[in-house]
Image (cartoon, rainbow, N blue to C red):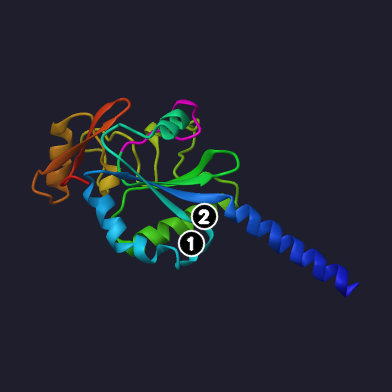
Amino acid sequence: MKKIISIFIISLFVLFATQTLAYELIVLSGETSKNSKRWKEEVFPGYANSEVGKTLPAKIVTFQGANFPEWIAGAIQESRVGEIVGTPTFIIWDAEKKQEVGRVEGYTEKPRFFSQMDEAMAMIRKGEHPGQREGSGGDHREEGSGGAQRQEEGSSTSKDIMDHMYKTPEEAKKASEMLGLGGEIHSHESPNGTIYMPGSTM
């Protein structure tokens, strides 16, 4: 009986390990993105030895503007990956189903990144899709860990820059001043046109 229980426990462990290894972290990194560069310098060297890195290997995909690699562009067209509105974007990828199961958008600091990844993996284990807002239908135009949603003028007092994405530079400038960034802004090209954000280039 003990032998049967032991075999059952080992089988469960192997099954869990196999399922975990089916996921990987696709790091979408902008060629000129300052925050992508910071992530590579501050996080990537030790990422593989971190708790999340041991079960979620990272693959960096670098691109410029909206010139995504063909397989990413195809996955976006087929709704297997949501819209990319800024870099870095961390896609948790199901390698077997060839689709996104969650994401974290943007990078501010190392501890926050690992906290966001832990939260994202906990949500996935519950069958939820981190980075996806209710009612979005899988389209990331109105979602994201920081929010890709356009804020109406004066509607948000969030201090998280990823909560401030706008369609006009004027709106982004006002948010920049509100956040104490001196009115400095930057822009990103997205499939739906240019988006503007407070602060220097990501």
Could you say which disc has been placed on residue 52 in the image?
1
The amino acid at mark 1 is Val
The residue under the point 53% across, 38% down is: 99
Circle nearer the N terminus (1, 2): 1
Q: Is residue 96 depicted above or below 138 in this figure?
A: below
Q: Is residue 173 depicted above or below 13 in this figure?
A: above
Residue behind mark 2: 121
The amino acid at mark 2 is Met
Q: Secondary structure at mark 2?
A: helix
Can you give x and y, in whole percent of width and height, for residue 125 in the image? 59, 53
Can you give x and y, in whole percent of width and height, for residue 143 in the image? 40, 38
The residue under the point 75% across, 66% down is: 10
The residue under the point 81% across, 71% down is: 6
Furthest toward the bottom, the residue is: 2
Q: Quadrant of residue 87?
A: top left
Q: Is residue 187 depicted above or below 27 in this figure?
A: above
| Mark 1 or 2, closer to the camera | 1
Quick check: 113 left or right of 156?
Answer: right
Q: Residues within 10 Å of mark 1 (few under 14, many from 20)?
A: some
Real-space CA distance between mark 1 and mark 2, rounded to the nearest whole angstrom: 8 Å
Quick check: 9 left or right of 55?
Answer: right
The residue under the point 33% across, 35% down is: 149
The reply to whether discs 1 and 2 touch (Cβ–Cβ < 8 Å) is: yes
Q: Residues within 10 Å of mark 2 (few under 14, many from 20)?
A: many
Can you give x and y, in whole percent of width and height, for residue 4 in the image? 87, 68
Q: Secondary structure at mark 1?
A: helix
Q: Which residues are magenta?
A: 77-85
Quick check: 35 left or right of 76?
Answer: left
Quick check: 4 left or right of 202?
Answer: right
